[in-house]
Image (tube, grey):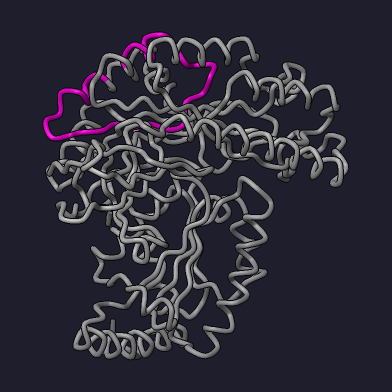
Amino acid sequence: MNEDMMTAEERSGAVSTAVDGAAAQTALRHGRGKGIYYVHTLGCQMNVHDSERIAGVLEADGYVKADQEQIDNNDVDLIVMNTCAVRENASNRMYGTLGQWAELKREHPQLQIAVGGCMAQKDRQRITQRAPWVDAVFGTKNIGSLTGLLDKARMYNTSQVEVAADLEYFPSQLPAARVSRISSWVAISVGCNNTCTFCIVPSVRGRERDRRPGDILDEIQRCVDSGAKEVTLLGQNVNSYGYSMGDRYAFSRLLRACGDIKGLERVRFTSPHPAAFTDDVIAAMAETPNVMHQLHMPLQSGSDRILRAMRRSYRTSKFMGIVDRVREAMPDAQITTDIIVGFPGETEEDFQQTLDILGRARFAGAYTFEYSPRPGTPAALMEQIPADVMRERYTRLHDMQESITLEEMGKFVGRDVEVLISGTGRKDSSTHRVTGRERTGTLVHIGVPEGEQMPQVGDFVTCTVTGSARHYIISDPDVRSGHTYSVRR
């Protein structure tokens, strides 16, 4: 378009584009591509995987991922926050962090800031009102639009917002920059059809949509071809996969199909819903060699009265029946859960029933939360539990579970475990250990015996467990005394 035919706004945009073009050429010459980016992720595994897609979209457009030194020195051109809306503290953290980034942007005016994820889907306008320095806001269904929004924000010098209500494409159709080369997330569905009174996920993720089995298996094969040794299948209710297609056995068939993929050593999945957990899934877990005996299944409350108030479509008898059948089929299974403390109307008797389930189930671990009201959910309008009562109950529950977890970790001592090496832990450099997870998901720190082979990331180490702590186990094997230590590539 001839400049004389442009509006003043367009002429301003053209100047900005020209300046940005020159800056982009300079960046390219200095190995920064279109710009150095950093993705800051809040929330669940689905968000972590979405961040891989965000990174993939950015890198496909010429952006370059920041290294740790660049992140520490704030030497970045783009920061993307992938947000969570499940709990109030995630919302508070988002606005607090955006406030810190505002100061950073004042010091570096060319810095761009984008906000995506569940909070962006929920509070699209509020974000731009409270944080007008944000350049782009994109919803859970608009990851592919991010780079275009950033380009428009540069051109027009105004915040750009794109939040779709309907799913037009699966995020899995987008490129991904995987966080790990040996472990991959693979989404098999998106969205949720449940109506739990405390949960905002259906309103920000939409109704459940399932991917075609062939598409999922093709993605898993590509991950394996790229070096992945394990995959984790993701879904808001991963085991209801296939229900939208009228096939209640689709998930168990998918697990069995994973067993036929050559080179795929380990398969995990999260998180299943107790209401849709069937015996054929248990059988598939037990009978498919590369499906790990690991189960994370949210309980939420041990009180049937509270489960009804939550609109959870199962009762404690069904939940414990699943736990018992899983352990009967797989005695080594490690089972973890989620529990909410202080849901509106919870009495001391209700809470005691949760403690009773904790004692019976003996979970290997539990993610415990104080109830957090989310605007727009039915539970937010119910009579709330006093904060001091909630805190006291949370402490009791947490202390009880920590004690159980410590005892369960102690049962590993003396056993041989196979560990997929993922790197080194925070203290491993000083203790000369490597770190990974054994088959049921427990974190293991391994001391390499003197004179033995040093394992690399992606190797498998079979070793004898010599110690335990609350959330991990330790292997410092002494091969001269009969302990096991061997490395497999």
Magenta residues span 256-284
Residue 437 falls in image quadrant: top left
**Rendering coords of residue 430 (x, y %):** 37, 66
Residue 210 falls in image quadrant: top left
Is the N terminus in the top left, top right, bottom left or bottom right quadrant? bottom left
Residue 479 falls in image quadrant: top left
* Residue drawn at x 16%, y 37% as measured from the top left: 221
* Residue drawn at x 26%, y 33% as measured from the top left: 266
Seen from this angle, which residue lies furthest front? 481
* Residue drawn at x 31%, y 39% as measured from the top left: 186
- 398 with respect to 448 (left or right): right
| Observer able to see residue 162 | no
- 434 with respect to 276 (left or right): left
Give the answer, above or below, for where 476 lies relative to 425.
above
Give the answer, above or below, for where 488 lies relative to 32.
above
**Rendering coords of residue 435 (x, y %):** 33, 51
